[in-house]
Image (cartoon, rainbow, N blue to C red):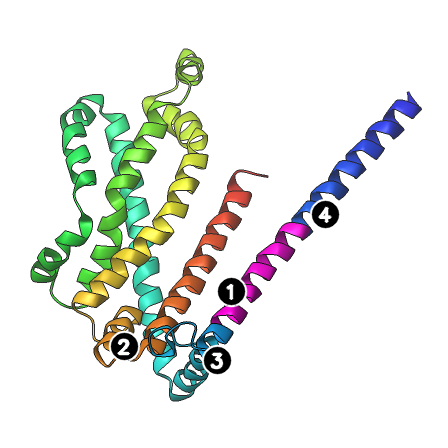
Amino acid sequence: MNNTQQNLKELHDSYKRSLLTEKRWIRFYQVLIFITFFVTWEFSSRLKVINPLIFSSPSKVGNLFIQKIGDGTLLSNLGITVFETVLGFIIGTLLGTVLAAILWWSPFLSKVLDPYLVILNAMPKVALGPILIVALGTGFTSIIAMGAIISVIITTIVVYTAFKEVDPNYLKVLQTFGATRQQCFKEAILPASFPTIISTLKVNVGLSWVGVIVGEFLVSAKGLGYMIIYGFQVFNFTLVLLSLLLIAVCATIMYQLVELLEKKLIRQ
């Protein structure tokens, strides 16, 4: 018995070491690809393999970053866009989840609204930008609404589908003990759908950034979207690339935060 336990422990330790080794190699290659990309970009620009006016270079982007940090304009624009994106992300996800819960609660309503959800999901949300601007004005409200509306319908559809696909046997057991529909939702439907909700959050990170940046393209005089448009107008592609890199970094941070939430809720 002791030998068996010892063998199992050794196998377990070996498995953990292999996972750790694999994780280190994955991180190594990720860093290697990152460094290779920027080194290749820098030398390609200096040797004029690529057009340095259009594609700029990491060194020029870095110098501009320091310059913009120094004059305070970068943090101001970055803060505005991050605020709008986070708020749009939260509103879109919460509203979509609430709508999904309402549809699950009322099968009749879900049957009535199902074709309209399909149509709204197929509609390009970016095309609603001008309408939102006219309806809500040219301030933060229309931009935040753009960030929310671009993800709310897909969130509703995906989460509602997850609610419907929960094993009905769970509900039958609860109903056998006299559970109400509200208790069934709280104790079975919602917890079982957490993985799908988290996956939707990950998708909504990118969608929210798209919505907000498009909104800033249309109306804003501040933010990273405005910096991109302004950079194109004055032919300053270094400013455009700096804005795009900042968007990539911020979106990555938001994605990592969602993964931390996933570990806390699901992988305990």
> Which numbered disc, 3 or 2, marks the residue that appears first in the sequence?
3
Residue 38 drawn in magenta:
yes
Which of the two residues, 15 or 172, is positioned nearer the viewer here?
A: 15
CB within 8 Å, label 4 to label 2: no
Callout 3 amino acid: Ser
Above or below, comparing residue 242 to residue 265 in the picture: below
Nearest to viewer (mark 4 / mark 3): 3
Residue depicted at 45% across the width and 29% down the height: 192
Which of the two residues, 194 or 42, is positioned nearer the viewer here?
A: 42
Callout 1 amino acid: Phe
Part of the protein shown in magenta: 25-41
Callout 4 amino acid: Thr
Q: Secondary structure at mark 2?
A: helix
Q: Is the C terminus in the top left, top right, bottom left or bottom right quadrant?
A: top right
Callout 2 amino acid: Gly
Q: Is residue 140 visible?
A: no
Residue 224 drawn in magenta:
no
Give the Cα separation between the discs numbered 4 and 2.
44 Å
The disc placed on residue 59 is 3
The residue indicated by pointer 4 is 21
